[in-house]
Image (cartoon, coloured by chain):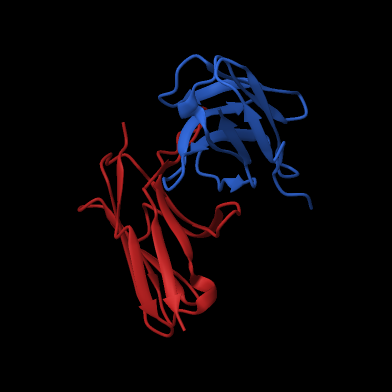
Amino acid sequence: GENVEQHPSTLSVQEGDSAVIKCTYSDSASNYFPWYKQELGKRPQLIIDIRSNVGEKKDQRIAVTLNKTAKHFSLHITETQPEDSAVYFCAASITIKAAGNKLTFGGGTRVLVKP
Amino acid sequence: DAGVTQSPTHLIKTRGQQVTLRCSPKSGHDTVSWYQQALGQGPQFIFQYYEEEERQRGNFPDRFSGHQFPNYSSELNVNALLLGDSALYLCASSLGQGGNIQYFGAGTRLSVL
């Protein structure tokens, strides 16, 4: 089955600096890659996603890049702010109509933005 | 527009007991997935329901079972609870199957003593 590895497990950055989180996946059939942010005691919230027919996607200070050949995708957060402090999870999915789309998650990255 | 709601928020059980967790999907969604999140780890897929049938299942034993009702709400049942079943159980809903965004509920925190 699919396996997703996420690095680093913890990341501490100064406010205003950039943060980068990297994930690798094992199944080349995976075609959907969401990123979720989970604050302490709260639900995972989708912050950005990318599909396999796109190499890069950006939404304000957040961007995701995908390298299908290397089976690698990354989350980039620019101009970090204290409210970006949270645990971030990457996930991979093989989307098959009539068969569902289970998400396989990485282990998470705890991001701390220091003021 | 109501998001994904789960009940109860917290639950304490003892080993060997049985538990039922409930989930109401986001308005307009018809697919429900369940995940188990152990402390400090990423969520792990348990199963997914669509059209009242289990469509996909993760690597969980038969002690974990579920149901989806005609109104798309869902239940997760766990029998013969083990200490290792202590976790946050998350429900996610989506529209249709394949390629659609999953929205998560706040979860049910289950403690098995």
Q: Quadrant of the C terminus of chain B?
A: top right
Residue at x 63% of width, y 17% of height: B18
Query: Does residue A3 appear left or right of residue B7 in this picture?
Result: left
Residue B69: give x, y in percent of width and height.
Answer: 73, 23
Residue B70: image quadrant is top right
Residue at x 66% of width, y 33% of height: B11
Residue at x 72% of width, y 49% of height: B3
Going by the picture, which residue comes out furthest to the front? B113
Q: Is residue B43 visible?
A: yes
The colour one sees for chain B in the rendered image is blue
Q: Is residue A70 above or below residue A11?
A: above
Residue A22: image quadrant is bottom left
Residue A78: give x, y in percent of width and height.
Answer: 41, 79
Going by the picture, which residue comes out furthest to the left? A70
Query: Does residue B93 appear left or right of residue A62 in this picture?
Result: right
The colour one sees for chain A in the rendered image is red
